[in-house]
Image (cartoon, helix red, strand yellow):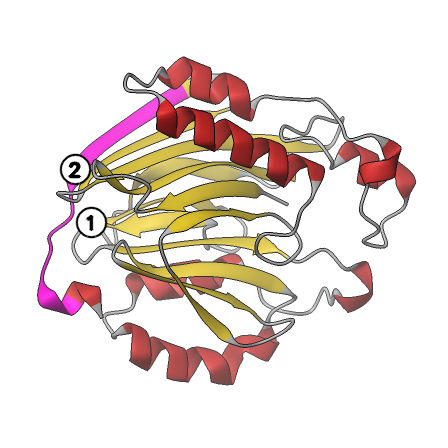
Amino acid sequence: MCVYAFAINPNEKYKFVLIGNRDEFYERESIPAHFWKDFPDILAGKDKKAGGTWLGINKNNGKIAFLTNYRDPKKFDSQKASRGLIVRNFLTSPASIQRFLIDFYAMQSAYNPFNLIFGTVDNLFYYSNVIGGLKNLTKGVYTLSNAFLDTNWYKTEKLKSYLLKILQNQNIDINEVFRCLEDKEKADDSLLPDTGVGYEKEKLLSSIFIESETYGTVFSYFILIDSKSNVSFYEKDQLNNKISEFKFQIKISKDNKS
C-alpha cells in the first residue's frame, strides 16, 4: 500500500527529502534497492514477479519516481498490468518528461488506480489516473498514501509531523528516522477512512508501519538530496532488519530540469 511524506526545497541545505514505507504481501518477493545490471544508473528495488519497482532514482539524469496504489476494491482488475512498471518505464526511458507523458497518457488505462510522483529532482509532478490532471509540485511538504495527494489520513498526518521534526534537526539520527517509520500506533475508529475494505482492514492499514500474518511493511526509506544534488539514500529491509546506504551525485545538465 505504501505511505510517504516528502519535502521540496524545505531549506537552503536540501532540495528534496523523503521518508516512507513500502507495504506488500510477504509472499510477493522483491529485491532491495540496488543499481540495476541492465540499467546501471538506476537505483531501485525490484518486484520479482513483474519486474517493476515502487521507488527509484536515476543518477545520470536526476529522474525520480515513486508510486502508490489508490485503494478502491471496486476498481481493481486482476488482469491489468503491474503498476510498478510505470516507475520502471519512466526511470529507464531516455525520453524527455514531455515525450514520456504523451505515451503514458495513451497507456494509463492499462493499470489499476494509482498515484505517481515523478520528474527530476528539480521539477516534480503528481498524477493520478483516477482523477486525471497533472500537478506541478512547488516548494512545500506533501504526503501520499492510498488516496489522493495530501489526503488527511491519520498515518499521513503523523508521518508529516515526523518529517517536519527531522527537517528541524541539524544532526539527523538515521536510526531515529527509522524508528519513526516503525510507528505501529493505529488510528482511533473515528479517524478511519472508508475505502471499501471493511473495518478490520481499515484499522490494520491505519498505522505508519503495518504488520500482520500475511501483509505488512517490507521496506522503509529515507532520502536526502542536497542543494548540490548529492544524494544520500537509506533503505531498511524490515524483513531482514538490514539498513543499506547509497551516496552519489546526480549529473546535472539543463536537460535534466525539463
Residue at figure coordinates x 85%, y 49% from the top left: 197
Tag 2 secondary structure: strand
**Front residue of 58 and 131:** 131
Rate crowding at label 2 as few (under 14), some (14 to 19) or many (20 or more) other CA atoms within 10 Å: few
Q: Quadrant where the C terminus lies?
A: bottom left
Q: In which quarter of the image is residue 44?
A: top left
Residue 113 appears left or right of 250: right
| Nearest to N terminus: mark 2 or mark 1 | 1
Residue shown at the point (82%, 34%) measured from the top left: 203
| Image position of 203 (left or right of 185) | right
- Up/down of 150 relative to 105, above or below: above
From the viewer's side, name the closer residue of 88 and 136.
136
Residue 2 shows up from this direction: yes
Left or right, 130 with respect to 165, comes to right
Instruction: Estimate the x, y position of residue 22 in percent, counting from the top left.
Output: 55, 39
Q: What element carries label 1?
A: loop
Q: Give the range drawn in magenta.
A: 243-255
Which residue is at 68% across, 29% downward?
210
Q: Are marks 2 and 1 in contact (CB under 8 Å)?
A: yes
What's the residue type where badge 2 is placed?
Phe
Look at mark 1 in the image and give the residue it sits on: 59
Height in image: 105 above or below 6?
A: below
Q: Looking at numbered disc 1 in the image, what kind of residue is underneath it?
A: Lys
Check residue 150 for magenta coloring: no
Residue 85: % across, % down: 47, 62
**Which residue in the protein does label 2 denote?**
248
Asked if residue 167 is positioned above or below residue 175 in the image, the reply reads: below
Using the numbered discs, state the Cα–Cα distance from disc 2 to disc 1 in whole angstroms: 7 Å
Report the disc number at residue 192: none
Left/right of residue 135 with respect to residue 34 in the rendered view: right
Percent x, y of residue 1: 64, 45
Spot occupied by residue 206 in the image (x, y as percentages of width and height): 74, 35
